[in-house]
Image (cartoon, rainbow, N blue to C red):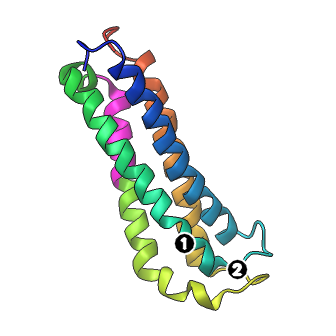
Amino acid sequence: MRDVPWLFPTFEGLHFVGMALLFGSIALIDLRVLGFVKGLPIGPLHRLLPLAFGGFALNVVTGIGFVASDPMSYWVVPAFRFKMLLILLAGLNAIWFWMSVLPKVDDWGAGQDASPLAKRISMASLLLWVGVITAGRFIAFAGTGTL
C-alpha cells in the first residue's frame, strides 16, 4: 500500500465514499424513526439498507488496506481501538434493531411515531456512528506520527 503512491489516497477517497453511503443511509432511517420527516413512511426507507451495506463493505475493504500497510502503527493508537469497539457496538445495535424493530416498521406509516424502543435504538445508532467517524478522524492525529 505504501509502495504505490496513488493507492493510499485512492483508498482514502473510497473510504470516504463508503462512509457517506453508510452513514447517509443509516442517518436518514434513524432520523425518521426519531420523528423527523414524519411525512415519510418508515418501511420503504429500509430499501436504503443495501446502500448502507455496500458502504460498510467498501469501508471494510479499504480499512483492511490501511491497517495492512502498517498494522502496529494503527494498533498503538487508542482512537483506532476505540473506533473498532464502536463499530462492534454499532453492529450489535443494528442486530438488535433488525430483530426487535424491523419486523414492525411496515405498521408505521407516514405521520406515525415509531415505538419508544425503536427510538432508543435509533438514537444509539446515530451516536455510535458519529463516534466511529470522530474516532476515525482522530487516528491520524493521535498516532505515532507514521500514519
Q: Earlier in the sequence, mark 1 or mark 2?
A: 2
Residue 101 to residue 36: above or below: below
**Helix, strand or loop at mark 2:** loop
Please tell me whether residue 38 is drawn above or below residue 8 in the rendered image: below
Q: CA distance from mark 1 to mark 2?
A: 12 Å
Q: Looking at the rendering, which quadrant does residue 82 occupy?
A: top left
Residue at position x 32%, y 44% from top?
Answer: 60
Residue 142, compared with residue 82, is above or below; it is: above
| Mark 1 crowd level (few <14, some 14–19, many ≥20, 10 Å Cα) | few
In the image, residue 58 lies at what x, y percent?
37, 45
Q: Residue 112 location in percent, x, y?
A: 75, 84
Locate the C terminus by quadrant.
Answer: top left
**Residue 93 is a magenta residue:** no
Q: Read off the magenta span.
A: 77-88
The image shows residue 18, relative to residue 65, as above or below, that is: below
Task: For mark 1, give the secondary structure.
Answer: helix
Q: Quadrant of residue 54?
A: bottom left
Q: Which residue is mark 2?
A: 41
Would residue 34 appear left or right of 98 to someone viewing this image?
right
Q: Residue furthest bottom?
A: 107
Disc marking residue 47: 1
Q: Give coordinates of residue 96: x percent, y percent.
A: 41, 72
**Residue 133 appears left or right of 112:** left
Circles 1 and 2, Cβ within 8 Å, touching? The answer is no
Between tags 1 and 2, which lies in front? 1
Which residue type does callout 2 highlight?
Answer: Pro
Q: Is residue 86 magenta?
A: yes
The secondary structure that dominates the magenta segment is helix
* Quarter-of-image position of residue 9: top left
Look at label 1 and name its amino acid.
Arg
Q: Pick the quarter of the image with the N terminus.
A: top left
